[in-house]
Image: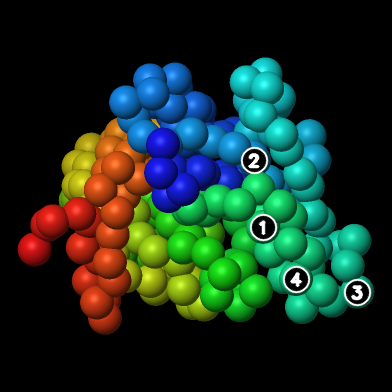
Amino acid sequence: MSKAGRLVVLVSGSGTNLQALLDASADPAYGARVVAVGADREGIEGLARAERAGIPTFVEKVGDHADRAAWDAAIAARIAEHKPGLVVSAGFMKILGAPTLEAFAVLNTHPALLPSFPGAHGVRDALAHGVKVTGCTVMLADAGVDTGPIIAQEAVRVFHGDDEAMLHERIKTVERGLLVEIVGRMAREGWAVKGRTVIIGGES
Ligand code: GRF
Protein backbone atom coordinates (compact mmCIF):
# COMPACT_ATOMS: atom_id res chain seq x y z
CA MET A 1 0.00 0.00 0.00
CA SER A 2 1.31 3.47 -0.89
CA LYS A 3 1.52 6.24 1.72
CA ALA A 4 -1.46 7.83 -0.05
CA GLY A 5 -3.51 4.83 1.06
CA ARG A 6 -3.19 5.66 4.76
CA LEU A 7 -6.56 7.20 5.61
CA VAL A 8 -7.53 9.23 8.65
CA VAL A 9 -11.33 9.53 8.56
CA LEU A 10 -13.12 12.30 10.47
CA VAL A 11 -16.73 11.78 11.59
CA SER A 12 -19.43 13.53 13.61
CA GLY A 13 -22.35 11.12 13.31
CA SER A 14 -23.50 7.72 12.16
CA GLY A 15 -20.36 6.96 10.13
CA THR A 16 -21.91 4.96 7.29
CA ASN A 17 -19.42 6.51 4.86
CA LEU A 18 -16.64 5.45 7.24
CA GLN A 19 -18.13 1.94 7.31
CA ALA A 20 -18.09 1.78 3.53
CA LEU A 21 -14.37 2.65 3.57
CA LEU A 22 -13.71 0.08 6.30
CA ASP A 23 -15.53 -2.58 4.28
CA ALA A 24 -13.71 -1.70 1.05
CA SER A 25 -10.31 -1.76 2.72
CA ALA A 26 -10.82 -5.36 3.85
CA ASP A 27 -9.61 -6.21 0.32
CA PRO A 28 -5.85 -5.47 0.08
CA ALA A 29 -6.32 -4.73 -3.62
CA TYR A 30 -8.34 -1.68 -2.65
CA GLY A 31 -5.06 0.08 -1.93
CA ALA A 32 -6.20 2.15 1.05
CA ARG A 33 -6.90 1.44 4.69
CA VAL A 34 -8.29 3.44 7.60
CA VAL A 35 -5.44 3.96 10.09
CA ALA A 36 -7.37 6.18 12.52
CA VAL A 37 -10.78 7.78 13.03
CA GLY A 38 -11.16 11.23 14.58
CA ALA A 39 -14.26 13.03 15.85
CA ASP A 40 -15.32 16.37 17.30
CA ARG A 41 -17.67 14.74 19.81
CA GLU A 42 -18.02 11.58 21.88
CA GLY A 43 -20.71 8.92 21.92
CA ILE A 44 -21.34 8.70 18.19
CA GLU A 45 -21.86 5.58 16.11
CA GLY A 46 -18.96 6.57 13.85
CA LEU A 47 -16.53 6.10 16.75
CA ALA A 48 -18.22 2.83 17.75
CA ARG A 49 -17.76 1.51 14.20
CA ALA A 50 -14.04 2.29 14.40
CA GLU A 51 -13.71 0.64 17.80
CA ARG A 52 -15.48 -2.49 16.57
CA ALA A 53 -13.04 -2.61 13.65
CA GLY A 54 -10.06 -2.24 16.02
CA ILE A 55 -9.06 1.13 14.54
CA PRO A 56 -7.51 3.78 16.86
CA THR A 57 -9.76 6.77 17.56
CA PHE A 58 -9.32 10.29 18.88
CA VAL A 59 -11.73 13.05 19.91
CA GLU A 60 -11.01 16.78 19.87
CA LYS A 61 -13.92 18.94 21.02
CA VAL A 62 -13.88 22.61 20.12
CA GLY A 63 -15.21 23.42 23.62
CA ASP A 64 -12.16 21.88 25.28
CA HIS A 65 -9.92 24.53 23.72
CA ALA A 66 -9.42 28.21 24.49
CA ASP A 67 -10.38 29.21 20.97
CA ARG A 68 -10.90 27.86 17.49
CA ALA A 69 -7.26 28.41 16.53
CA ALA A 70 -6.19 26.16 19.41
CA TRP A 71 -8.61 23.46 18.25
CA ASP A 72 -7.34 23.81 14.68
CA ALA A 73 -3.79 23.17 15.89
CA ALA A 74 -4.84 20.32 18.17
CA ILE A 75 -6.80 18.37 15.57
CA ALA A 76 -3.99 18.80 13.03
CA ALA A 77 -1.54 17.38 15.58
CA ARG A 78 -3.81 14.40 16.32
CA ILE A 79 -4.19 13.69 12.60
CA ALA A 80 -0.42 13.99 12.07
CA GLU A 81 0.27 11.27 14.66
CA HIS A 82 -1.15 8.76 12.17
CA LYS A 83 0.86 9.96 9.14
CA PRO A 84 -2.03 9.90 6.67
CA GLY A 85 -1.71 10.18 2.92
CA LEU A 86 -5.29 11.37 2.76
CA VAL A 87 -7.69 12.77 5.35
CA VAL A 88 -11.35 12.00 4.64
CA SER A 89 -13.96 14.29 6.16
CA ALA A 90 -16.97 11.95 6.04
CA GLY A 91 -19.90 13.64 7.72
CA PHE A 92 -17.52 15.70 9.89
CA MET A 93 -19.47 18.81 10.85
CA LYS A 94 -16.54 21.18 11.31
CA ILE A 95 -14.59 23.33 8.88
CA LEU A 96 -10.94 22.38 9.17
CA GLY A 97 -8.44 25.20 9.66
CA ALA A 98 -5.15 26.03 8.00
CA PRO A 99 -3.00 23.71 10.18
CA THR A 100 -4.82 20.66 8.76
CA LEU A 101 -5.46 21.99 5.25
CA GLU A 102 -1.84 23.04 4.74
CA ALA A 103 -0.38 19.77 6.01
CA PHE A 104 -2.67 17.21 4.37
CA ALA A 105 -4.84 16.53 1.36
CA VAL A 106 -8.38 16.51 2.72
CA LEU A 107 -11.27 14.91 0.88
CA ASN A 108 -14.81 15.97 1.71
CA THR A 109 -18.19 14.57 0.76
CA HIS A 110 -21.40 16.57 0.53
CA PRO A 111 -25.00 15.44 -0.04
CA ALA A 112 -25.86 17.89 -2.85
CA LEU A 113 -24.59 18.84 -6.29
CA LEU A 114 -22.22 21.70 -5.50
CA PRO A 115 -22.03 24.61 -5.97
CA SER A 116 -25.77 24.36 -5.22
CA PHE A 117 -26.79 23.91 -1.59
CA PRO A 118 -23.51 24.03 0.35
CA GLY A 119 -23.47 23.93 4.15
CA ALA A 120 -24.92 21.77 6.88
CA HIS A 121 -28.39 21.35 5.35
CA GLY A 122 -27.72 20.49 1.72
CA VAL A 123 -30.53 17.95 1.48
CA ARG A 124 -33.13 20.11 3.25
CA ASP A 125 -32.19 23.18 1.19
CA ALA A 126 -32.41 21.29 -2.13
CA LEU A 127 -35.81 19.89 -1.19
CA ALA A 128 -37.06 23.32 -0.08
CA HIS A 129 -35.92 24.81 -3.38
CA GLY A 130 -37.96 22.25 -5.29
CA VAL A 131 -35.16 20.77 -7.40
CA LYS A 132 -35.99 17.57 -9.30
CA VAL A 133 -32.41 16.30 -9.35
CA THR A 134 -29.85 16.56 -6.56
CA GLY A 135 -27.01 14.23 -5.61
CA CYS A 136 -23.63 14.13 -3.98
CA THR A 137 -20.22 15.69 -4.47
CA VAL A 138 -16.76 14.45 -3.51
CA MET A 139 -14.28 17.33 -3.38
CA LEU A 140 -10.99 18.47 -1.94
CA ALA A 141 -11.57 20.60 1.14
CA ASP A 142 -10.38 24.17 1.22
CA ALA A 143 -10.92 26.99 3.72
CA GLY A 144 -14.49 27.68 2.55
CA VAL A 145 -17.74 25.86 3.16
CA ASP A 146 -17.94 23.18 0.44
CA THR A 147 -16.00 25.34 -2.03
CA GLY A 148 -12.99 23.13 -2.85
CA PRO A 149 -12.15 21.60 -6.25
CA ILE A 150 -14.79 19.06 -7.26
CA ILE A 151 -13.51 15.54 -7.96
CA ALA A 152 -16.70 13.64 -8.74
CA GLN A 153 -20.46 14.01 -8.59
CA GLU A 154 -23.46 11.74 -9.02
CA ALA A 155 -27.06 12.71 -9.52
CA VAL A 156 -30.04 11.42 -7.52
CA ARG A 157 -33.64 12.08 -8.54
CA VAL A 158 -36.04 13.74 -6.13
CA PHE A 159 -39.36 11.90 -5.96
CA HIS A 160 -42.75 13.43 -5.24
CA GLY A 161 -43.42 12.94 -1.54
CA ASP A 162 -39.77 12.72 -0.51
CA ASP A 163 -38.96 14.09 2.90
CA GLU A 164 -35.45 15.07 4.00
CA ALA A 165 -34.70 11.72 5.64
CA MET A 166 -35.91 9.64 2.67
CA LEU A 167 -33.98 11.71 0.16
CA HIS A 168 -30.83 11.79 2.30
CA GLU A 169 -30.87 7.99 2.62
CA ARG A 170 -31.06 7.60 -1.19
CA ILE A 171 -28.27 10.14 -1.63
CA LYS A 172 -26.12 8.41 0.99
CA THR A 173 -26.37 5.08 -0.83
CA VAL A 174 -24.90 6.73 -3.93
CA GLU A 175 -22.48 8.88 -1.90
CA ARG A 176 -20.89 5.88 -0.18
CA GLY A 177 -20.21 4.18 -3.50
CA LEU A 178 -18.72 7.32 -5.02
CA LEU A 179 -16.52 8.02 -1.98
CA VAL A 180 -15.18 4.46 -1.94
CA GLU A 181 -14.45 4.62 -5.67
CA ILE A 182 -12.65 7.98 -5.52
CA VAL A 183 -10.61 7.25 -2.39
CA GLY A 184 -9.46 3.93 -3.85
CA ARG A 185 -8.49 5.48 -7.16
CA MET A 186 -6.60 8.32 -5.49
CA ALA A 187 -4.72 5.87 -3.28
CA ARG A 188 -3.85 3.50 -6.13
CA GLU A 189 -3.19 6.00 -8.92
CA GLY A 190 -2.18 9.24 -7.17
CA TRP A 191 -3.55 12.66 -8.07
CA ALA A 192 -2.59 16.17 -9.03
CA VAL A 193 -4.44 19.45 -8.57
CA LYS A 194 -4.34 22.10 -11.31
CA GLY A 195 -6.41 25.09 -10.31
CA ARG A 196 -9.90 23.73 -9.76
CA THR A 197 -9.23 20.46 -11.58
CA VAL A 198 -8.25 17.29 -9.75
CA ILE A 199 -6.56 14.78 -12.04
CA ILE A 200 -6.45 11.21 -10.77
CA GLY A 201 -3.67 9.02 -12.19
CA GLY A 202 -3.29 9.34 -15.92
CA GLU A 203 -6.74 10.85 -16.41
CA SER A 204 -6.76 13.99 -18.54
C1 GRF B 1 -23.36 12.41 4.57
O1 GRF B 1 -24.44 12.56 3.68
C2 GRF B 1 -22.42 13.57 4.47
O2 GRF B 1 -22.21 14.04 3.17
C3 GRF B 1 -23.17 14.58 5.28
O3 GRF B 1 -23.63 13.86 6.39
C4 GRF B 1 -23.77 12.50 6.01
C5 GRF B 1 -22.91 11.67 6.92
O4 GRF B 1 -23.36 10.36 6.97
N1 GRF B 1 -22.38 15.73 5.61
P1 GRF B 1 -22.56 9.23 7.75
O5 GRF B 1 -22.18 9.78 9.12
O6 GRF B 1 -21.35 8.85 6.93
O7 GRF B 1 -23.54 8.10 7.86
Crowd around label 2: few <14 · some 14–19 · many ≥20 (10 Å) = many
Q: Name the residue under label 2.
A: 37
Q: Name the residue under label 1.
A: 80
Q: Which of marks 4 and 2 is nearer the N terminus?
A: 2
Q: Which of marks 4 and 1 is nearer the N terminus?
A: 4
Q: Nearer the viewer, mark 4 or mark 1?
A: 1
Disc number for residue 66: 3
Secondary structure of the residue carrying tag 4 is: helix
Which amino acid lies under the numbered mark 3 shown in the image of this protein? Ala
Q: Which of 51 and 145 is in front in this view?
A: 51
Q: Which of marks 1 and 3 is nearer the N terminus?
A: 3
Crowd around label 1: few <14 · some 14–19 · many ≥20 (10 Å) = some
Quadrant placement of the C terminus: bottom left
Which amino acid lies under the numbered mark 2 shown in the image of this protein? Val
The residues bearing labels 4 and 1 have C-alpha atoms spaced at a distance of 10 Å
Vertical position of residue 70 compared to residue 52: above or below: below
Query: Residue at position x 77%, y 78% from top?
Result: 69
Q: Nearer the viewer, residue 141 or 160?
A: 141
Q: Mark 4 points at which residue?
A: 73
The residues bearing labels 1 and 2 have C-alpha atoms spaced at a distance of 12 Å
Whether residue 37 is visible here, answered yes or no, is yes
Q: Which of marks 1 and 2 is nearer the N terminus?
A: 2
In percent of width and height, residue 39 lies at 70, 47
The residues bearing labels 3 and 4 have C-alpha atoms spaced at a distance of 11 Å
Q: Earlier in the sequence, mark 2 or mark 3?
A: 2
